[in-house]
Amino acid sequence: MRRFFVFAGLAVALIGLDSTRLRAASPRDQLIADLRAHVKHVFVIYQENRSYDSYFGTFPGGEGLASPLAKTHGFRQYDPLGGRFVTPFRIVESDVADADHSRPGLIRRVDDGRMDLFVADEEFAQLGRGATREDAHAVGLLTMAYEDCDTIPFLWKYARDFALYDHIFQGMYGPSTPGNIDIIAAQAGQSQLARHPEQKVAANSVGKGEPVVNDVYPAWGPYHNGEPAAKQLDQTYANVLLTLAGGDAAKLTTDTDEIKDDIASLVRAGKSGVGWGWYQEGFKDDGSGKYPAYITHHNGPQYFGYLRQNDAAWSNVHDLTDLFPAIEQGTLPDRDVVIVKGGYKNPFGWKPGHAGFDGDDDHPAYASAHLSEALVAKVVNAIARSKYWNDSAIVITWDDSEGFYDHVPPPSYASCPDAHPCGDGPRVPLILISPFAKSHAHAVVHDSGDHASFVKFLNVLYDLPALASLPNEAPYLPNGPRDLMTSITDLVGGFDPQRLAGTKPPLAATLATIDDASVTTFPPRMSCKSLGITPVLVPGGMASPPPGFAPRKRS
């Protein structure tokens, strides 16, 4: 009997040991362990206002304009001012007009998932704002235009050589500000609304209020064009820049009443902090209000009082040009997150190949697509040539879809004060560049996610508590941060497990490098032909732009 108990005890011990090993060696656990061992620096180049279909609708292997889904979701749209139907058409223009990308406009265009009112809604929106019939027609048609590797060859090169995601959506129906908040908070104020119902934004999405659905300027400066007449409410919920601080969150002492329990939990956990920096073009905090390149409502941290009013956090916000010496001289923290934003006027003296736009954040109406992808290439080159390449992950994505056509119906979650879903909005592109990324011809990642995916990725990589798990946020779920939603990818699917495990060599920095002469030549020297990429043919697409099309307004 004693011998039986000895053997039984030994068997239980062995079973426990084997199960522990199995758990530790599961593919997911092993991938995360390897990811944490290899990736120490995360860079996100956060551009503006492009839909997936407008930039990558003909990229091989992606859910694009030639798919069966596209044929049944807005591929053929009526043009009221032209009196005809139009389908997607290719352009090679680097400078285009600004389409309506307000919350109400995006909701109308998506049309309950039918994706079929982009042209008509834009034309009526333009007329409503006083545009001429000719200009309203031109911009309405623009919503159905798409570019390829002849216009944005650098981006297509990165998409080919690294990992392109084709099911990432903007997290909130709305313009730039919600997206710039969402990428660090995995929400745009839904938990604040739940906590303070009296702060509800107007049902027509105009003015200050929760959640943030428009571009009202933050409560504090700096402002790029003087003191604004209207200011947004202080955003008081947790974001990932708080959780990155770890135990150092205790250094935040001003405007912390509604995250005090979150801070206490971070301090109790006792984890070391991870550095972060927000690098935005034209940023200057000297009180002069003269910042011709700076775009106030694109600065996500500026909306949060506990970041803006505490030097321990606000000292991490910098001008874009400060980033390059920091990379070259190797002065970034040992582990960190860097967010890069362009602006109204590039600081590098770049001029497009014609009398076009000088901006470099990809926003139509002031930024050139050529200059914007040059900014991306300049940042990627700096990282690839530095000591940071070997342990880096670079994310390139966009804050909203600009009101340009995309055919994939967005997922639906939550309900906003206007009785429409808060999100997701239309698709945006996302590219992952890393020595450990998946990389073969057209390695498209089909995992579904949105801006909250970036927060989820940081949670996994740096072992951060989910924002939705924090004591000041959890009571208001499902209104609040989305970083515990299982339907949203954490971006880990873009990494190659074999590269992370060391059984396949990491990707060389040269694969991410574009020679400087090419980066600073406008229009770019690269093309589909020189890259050896053949865009997918779009059956039923228009062979040329339709009558009435012009890339920019005439008046």
Image (spheres, rainbow, N blue to C red):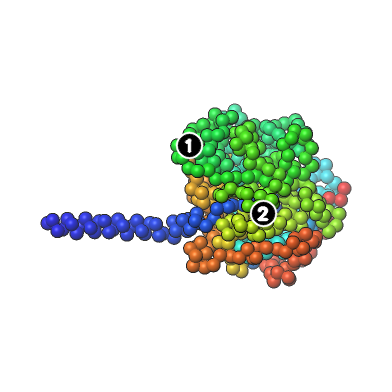
Residue farthest left in this picture = 1
Residue 110 vs residue 15: left or right?
right
* Amino acid type for the residue under numbered disc 2: Glu
Residue 278 placed where, x, y %? 65, 44
Viewport quadrant of the N terminus: bottom left
Residue 293 vs residue 335: left or right?
right
- 327 or 254, nearer to the observer: 327
Q: Nearer the viewer, mark 2 or mark 1?
A: 2
Callout 1 crowding tier (Cα within 10 Å): few <14, some 14–19, many ≥20? some
Residue 308 placed where, x, y %? 64, 35
Residue at 54%, 41% in the rendered image: 245
Residue 237 placed where, x, y %? 56, 35
Question: Distance from label 2 to label 1 (Cα)?
Answer: 33 Å
Residue at 72%, 68% in the rendered image: 528
- 529 or 283, nearer to the observer: 283
Callout 2 crowding tier (Cα within 10 Å): few <14, some 14–19, many ≥20? some
- Tell me the SS state at disc 1: helix
